[in-house]
Amino acid sequence: MISMYSAKVMEHFKNPRNMGEIPNADGVGTVGNPVCGDMMTIYIKVKDDRLADIKFKTFGCGAAIATSSMITELARGKTLKEALEITRKNVADSLDGLPPIKMHCSNLAADGLHAAIEDYYKKKGGNKN
Amino acid sequence: MSMSSHRVYLDYGASKPVDPRVLEAMAPYHMEQFGNPSSSYSFALEGREVLEESRKKVASLIGAKPSEVIFTSGATESINMAIKGVAYRNRTKGTEVLYSAIEHMSSVNVSKYLARQGFTVASIPVDRTGLIDLDALKKAMSEKTLIVSVMYANGEIGTIQPIRRVAEVVHKSGSYLHVDAVAAAGQIPIDVNRDGVDLMSLSSNDLYGPKGVGALYIREGTRIEPFIHGGGQERGLRSGTENLPGIVGMAKAAEVILPEMASESPRLAVLRDRLIDGALKTIKEAHLNGPQKERLPNNANVRFSYIEGESLILSLDMEGIQVSSGSACTSKTLEPSHVLMAIGLKHEEAHGSLSFTFGKGNTQEDVDYVLGVLPPIVKRLRMMSPLTPKDFTA
């Protein structure tokens, strides 16, 4: 089958890693919106400043689902600082690239992860008070 | 990467294979009878005869006189010629150009082009099923309206328009009615005189003819400006040496499809209804786009809540099924289908819509295969989607 996507994108689309929700997640980040056609929510569990667990839920095209899946693989086990350094480009490169038209609209996973970590920091800050 | 040995093509609206009888009819005009119909020796004169025979066959498909049919390079050219040609030729009458909100992008973009050239352009809304709002059309019409474009039937959501009633409204203002019949021709009976059509655009490939050829019907007496100037072929309206193999192919396709429509269209309507009924019955929150009746026999369009069309297409493609989607992710412009937006769908509803268009190669087994494969695909994508309600169970 000839695809507009790399074999790696298709593989992640077919067998997405870490799909689902984390009940009582320490941080939740939602980016994109259904109007654009791509929306994802990243859930994280933090232990000793590391991402002990990460899951996603995504509405969107093949690229949106594959990048969500990939970010969970890239980020799991990393420290929060390391995770914040993961870029959109890292995600696309790890998937052997994305079609140019998908680089902006569907490559949201890094943003979703960063939003989830920010949410974690915000909640943590709130708990201290 | 294919995971399936099945191949179920359900995108005949996007492209059709050429009928073998058409290919056979075209064959001699590439290498043997290659004469230019404009030349004067007997070898070429045969070509001229063939050209006029072809015109007759295409005219028969829509109840026109042969002299009212012009061959073009395809429906896009026909649509450009019809709208621009009438607008420019009749400028002394006024500046208004109207089109229905669910016209093909070529009618939409030609009209937008004319707006940039100083014409007054407006689109006429449609209802939830895609039917043109005749009252809105009446209100928009004036003595200054030059041309109104309303498609005979919409290839994406299947809506068949009441063209005759549209024509009555349009003609009250002495305006011309242009009808894009690309999706309707060969599917339902068309008669330009019964329907009151002034100009009609046709595509060869949509009749199982070759690509790169089309026709424009221009009612006798219609004032129209040519845009392709040259040797004066096609009554001076469309210069350029005639694409005789293509024209012969389109004519053969029209000749073949006209009598076969009576049995083929009801056959496709059965497949269409089986797919629609099956999908709506087995999949929760699946909804029909477009009308239940007055629908093209070869079109089904279903939207699935909470999921997106491109991931549906990818998943179906892995099972050997080819369909189209209204999703932004499958368009060049990254905008969802303007047709689905015009019938009042929300963005996320348009994104999650699939268009199935049936054709000659499809069987009941195809539909049953799709109905077997589709529900688990929808279920899987819904499980992944953050839009799926927590208490939703497929």
Image (tube, helix red, strand yellow):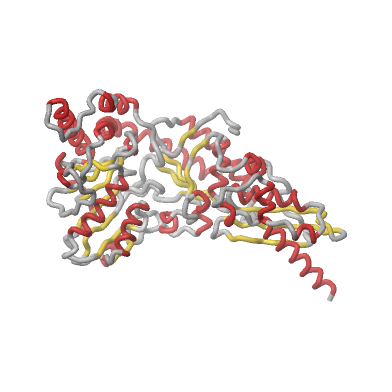
Q: Going by the picture, which residue comes out furthest to the right?
A: A48
Q: Going by the picture, which residue comes out furthest to the bottom?
A: A129
Of residues B9 and B273, the one drawn nearer to the viewer in this rendering: B9
Q: Is residue A24 above or below residue A11?
A: below
Q: How many marks?
A: 0
Q: Is residue B273 above or below residue B136?
A: above
Q: Residue at x 22, y 50 (%)?
A: B199
Q: Residue at x 14, y 29 (%)?
A: B45
- Assign the N terminus of chain B to one quadrant of the image: top right
> Where is residue B66, by image quadrant?
top left
Location of residue B227 in the rendering, given as x and y in whole percent from the top left corner: 23, 51
Of residues B362 and A30, the one drawn nearer to the viewer in this rendering: A30
Q: Residue at x 41, y 54 (%)?
A: B339
Q: Is residue B36 left or right of residue B98?
A: left
Location of residue A74 in the rendering, given as x and y in whole percent from the top left corner: 75, 50
Residue B390 visible, this orientation: no
